[in-house]
Image: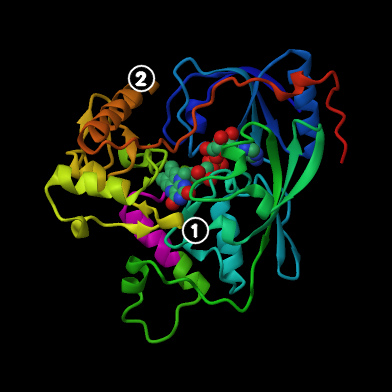
Amino acid sequence: MHIVQEAPLATRTTLHLGGPARFFAEIRTESELLEALAFSDAHQLPIFVLGGGSNLLVPDEGYPGLVLHLVIDGPIKRRGDLFDVPAGTHWDAFVRYVCELGISGIECLAGIPGLVGASPIQNIGAYGEDVSQTIHTVRAYDRHTFAFTTLTRDQCGFSYRESLFNSSQRNRYIITSVTFSLDPTATPNLTYADLRRHFSAATAPPTPLDVYHAVREIRDAKGMLLPDPASGQSIPDHRSAGSFFKNPVVSPSALATIAEALAIPESDIPRYPAPDGQIKLPAAWLLDRAGFHKSYILGEAGISSRHTLALINRGHATYADITRLRDHILQTIQDRFHLVLEQEPVEPRPEPRPELTTQAGHRGRA
Ligand SMILES: Cc1cc2nc3c(=O)[nH]c(=O)nc-3n(C[C@H](O)[C@H](O)[C@H](O)COP(=O)(O)OP(=O)(O)OC[C@H]3O[C@@H](n4cnc5c(N)ncnc54)[C@H](O)[C@@H]3O)c2cc1C
């Protein structure tokens, strides 16, 4: 394991901005992870785990601790319906692998950037599927108990764009592999209207691989498919962190407030049912109604020309540029609809080191 100093982070994120990491290490095995944690202990450094950098907003001052680039790779191991996948596997490569086997369950999640190890963090989802439906267990290093552990799906506390990893137990677990349970008899999920339209003229039911390609095509049209870095293609619409705001889940009375603000009937507001009688609203629709349309520009930051929810780096944006646009949107939505939107991308910031709560070191119990 090799630790470097002042490593740039901007080039390792899809927003292409932010300052350097004070220390940076590529982690390729679980023992390298333990070595790096021992280094952070010895130097009292906060740590941040980096995957593919596709859901990050890095501050201009960078990260003042040790960034662990978690790229543990290796073969995907199949045990019947279970697939053990190393954390450093590219998410889309895993989806394609499964679809090529003719197996359904994650085909609608094709084209989501990032690595498998990050997939449980915000319970990635799209087009009618999310990973909580197929995750069986998560193997992780627990920074509270100094040991590797296995969490079952129920222990992960999954909900919309949430898990215990990004809420109550944030910063506690470092995921080294994920096991998925995939039913070989399941058929592809075509609940998403764009997908049904795509296959409306098809004469035979689509295979998982057909759906994989269709999802990527639909995502591409929305600027939500990143080009292969080797292609050298770089357009502003691709310099984003995907959807910048989560779809808000609101009460029926909040829906009435929005209808009143817009002087429209509640029935004109697009929505999806959410648990406990709540309602999920498309954040993109709210932005649009508040005047934040595709191609909106504020200095070096802007909104994608193909997706209202994607804030983009137009070329030379800094963290300050993106957050100026973010704050302008948040304030406008709050003033107009009395609604507080939640940011999706994570900001790497030093957090209290859980291991300081005990005298023990990283023993690396397996
Ligand atoms: C164009 C585009 C489209 C997108 N579309 C979608 C979409 O449809 N649905 C969706 O849900 N998301 C989407 N995203 C967001 C993003 O791709 C996902 O959140 C993805 O899972 C992030 O993976 P990553 O490896 O890039 O993680 P990073 O961005 O590197 O990290 C994200 C968070 O996960 C943590 N983390 C990463 N790896 C580990 C690990 N091994 N152990 C512990 N913590 C870890 C990080 O510390 C950080 O908090 C999109 C992003 C882009 C740029």
Q: Amino acid at mark 2?
A: Ala
Reply yes or no: does residue 216 show up in magenta: yes
Q: Picture coordinates of residue 82 (x, y %)?
A: 72, 64
Colour scheme of the picture: rainbow
Q: Is residue 274 on the magenta stretch?
A: no
Asked if residue 72 shows in the view, the reply is no
Q: Is the CB of mark 1 within 8 Å of ligand 1? A: yes
- Secondary structure under the numbered disc 1 in the rendered image: helix
In the foreground, 118 or 212? 118
> In the picture provided, is 124 more to the left or to the right than 321?
right
* Residue 44, label in figure: none
Where does the magenta region start and end? 213-228
Q: Position of residue 72 (x, y in %)?
A: 71, 42
**Percent from the top left, x then y, of residue 251?**
35, 48
**Residue 193 vertical position relative to residue 72 in the rendered view, above or below:** below
**Circle on res. 320:** 2
Residue at the disc numbered 1: 109
